[in-house]
Amino acid sequence: MIDENSQDERLIILDTETTGINPREGHRIVEIGCVEMVNRQLTGRNYHVYVKPMAYGMQMVMEQEVINIHGLTDDFLQDKPVFEQVGQEFVDFIKGARLVIHNAKFDVGFMDHEFAMVPGLPKTTDICSVTDTLKVSKDEFGSPKTLDYLARFYKVDKLIDRTYHGALIDAQLLAFVYIEMTRKQETLNLHSGDGKNADANAIRRVNINRSKLKVLHATADELEEHEKRLAIVSEKGATPLWQK
């Protein structure tokens, strides 16, 4: 179960792409993708960077099997910054947030490996808490599920084009998955007073003499933008919940 102690907690949905599977074997991060969420809403703030992987003062040469996964070639990464150049700005972006990562052990392992090679940078858990949605999926489904499985299960798989498993692309997809995974935890605050010893399921009566609620109708421009958004959703093969 995902802990939702604070609705306005700052979340960073994060993913990385790497040159291999084990930092202890010298593999490095080549892409970082982060999206920010507050109060279960995407804020529009992202952090995305490609990183040139280095070893012994030279750019690493990636195996074709790895390139086939994320689509990043040695030539593409040749003019990108090395991790030391972006490490501090990356730390500044995630500091104080709760990271939401699918298979966090993998990504945090690589992050800590990179941080350790830059003087002055902290370990991930020194500046962030971490929620691993792979572990959450095990609790929810009885066995750990891949991001692809969860995206299909929650019917958000068609919202993102994942021809390649890019870090920012996967972070955006995980954000949609996370919203659906935690949707059932949304509850109405129905108790009165300070909430102490109150029954959250008790019925709260509404004063019949209350003033009428003001109804704000959508403008023509807003309705037009709404129709455009629905068209985009339809092109992706998805259907809004209220139309199902």
Image: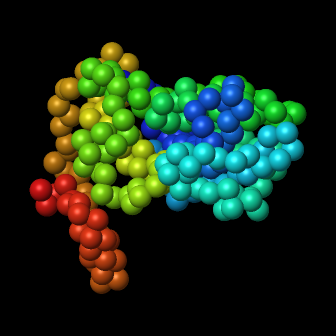
Q: Tell me residue 88's x, y (percent).
A: 78, 44
Residue 124 seen: no
Marker count (numbered): 0
Q: Where does the C terminus fall, quadrant-wise?
A: bottom left
Asked whether 82 or 120 is in front, the reply is 82
What residue is drawn where x is 25% and y is 49%?
A: 155
What residue is drawn where x is 69% and y is 61%?
A: 75
Q: Tell me residue 215's x, y (percent).
A: 26, 67
Describe residue 99's horizontal placement relative to residue 243 as left or right. right
What residue is drawn where x is 33% and y is 15%?
A: 197
Vertical order, 60 against 21 (above or below): below
Q: Residue furthest front?
A: 64
Describe residue 80's horizontal placement relative to residue 135 as left or right. right
Q: Tell me residue 39's x, y (percent).
A: 45, 44
Q: Residue furthest top?
A: 197
Residue 19 seen: yes
Vertical order, 31 against 205 (above or below): below
Asked whether 200 or 213 is in front, the reply is 200
Vertical order, 23 against 85 (above or below): above
Asked whether 57 or 114 is in front, the reply is 57
Q: Residue furthest left?
A: 244
Q: Tell me residue 140's x, y (percent).
A: 29, 25
Q: Quadrant of residue 192?
A: top left
Q: Where does the N terminus fall, quadrant-wise?
A: top left
Describe residue 202's horizontal placement relative to residue 82 as left or right. left
Q: How is the image coloured?
A: rainbow
What residue is drawn where x is 73% and y is 51%?
A: 52
Vertical order, 176 against 188 (above or below): below
Q: Residue furthest bottom?
A: 220
